[in-house]
Amino acid sequence: MDFKTIRYETSDKVATVTFHRPEQMNALNDEMVAELHDAMQMAERDRNARVIVLTGAGRAFCAGGDIGGFGAVDPKSLLTKLPRPLDLNRRVDYQMRHVYFPRLRKPVIGMINGAAAGLGLVYALACDVRFAADTTVFTTAFARRGLSAEYGMAWILARVVGQANALDLLLSARKVQGPEARELGLVNKVFPAGMLAEETYAYAREMAQWCSPRSMRVIKEQLYEVPFQTLHEAVLMANRDMVVSNACADFREGTASFREKRPPCFQDDEE
């Protein structure tokens, strides 16, 4: 598939999806939003990829929405504007516009190489794991533009950094740099800018080589169901998954490779 605003490549079982409008600091327009969705679906289907890395070209991860780049639409239409028709057999919450990464079967690592603001921060928060450069700047931005917290950021941010920190970041819209972002829990790790790619890909390659694609899918599903479950429901789900997992080929291979002290040869996840 040919993309104009996104770059897609694979290596060592890792797919890299790159926001690619560097002159505009990767600000999002309608075309980029659509291409990003297509690229993520491509990565999910790609047998050469077990892990997805999302990053930005140039000096920014994603500076938010391009003020002049979105179509002139009735704001009310955003209530129903979805990346694709709803699958009523799956949780609706993770099928909404911009926040669909949790329903992807593969882990998504945000390699946040530069500014992440507004809608760009929404996409960063939608990633499963986030690594940032120490020079990266984060801001929710909305309150300083006369806007509300958009696309579920209030819900996601509060889950990531806690209610008090979410209120701070959303109400002030202040800028936060990499080290403070790590302290707040906004990102998992912070690296010197020159080491970010090396460290991120080392982590992604290790995950792709040593972890069962099926296990990663199931564990991701378990974690993203938690906000909607009681402990009792979570235990029941885990018990059902455990019975199936104990009978699968990857469990046998994982056990054998551990005993034989060799890298595992896990199957591709067919769900």
Image: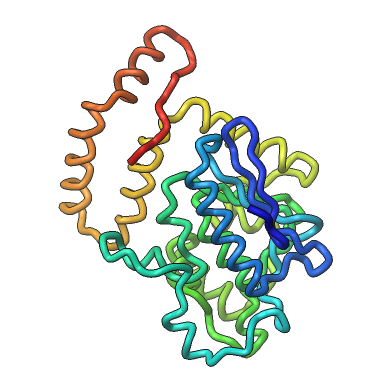
| Residue 54 vertical position relative to residue 126 in the rendered view, above or below | above
Give x and y (percent) for residue 61: 70, 59
Give x and y (percent) for residue 223: 35, 50
- The residue that appears at 46% across and 44% down in the rendered structure is 106
| Residue 217 vertical position relative to residue 118 in the rendered view, above or below | above
Residue 247: quadrant of the picture: top left
| Residue 188 vertical position relative to residue 119 in the rendered view, above or below | above
- The residue that appears at 33% across and 17% down in the rendered structure is 255
- Chosen colour scheme: rainbow
- Relative to residue 266, is residue 39 drawn left or right? right
Can the viewer see residue 55? Answer: no
Decide which of 61, 139 is in the foreground and name it: 61
| Residue 171 vertical position relative to residue 14 in the rendered view, above or below | below
Query: How many numbered marks, from 0 up?
Result: 0
- Relative to residue 227, is residue 234 drawn left or right? left
- The residue that appears at 56% across and 47% down in the rendered structure is 109
User: Which quadrant does the C terminus fall into?
Assistant: top left
- The residue that appears at 77% across and 64% down in the rendered structure is 21
Can the viewer see residue 78? Answer: yes
Question: Residue pushed farthest right?
Answer: 23
Question: Residue pushed farthest front?
Answer: 1
Decide which of 218, 82 is in the foreground and name it: 82
Decide which of 97, 144 is in the foreground and name it: 97
- Relative to residue 209, is residue 219 drawn left or right? left
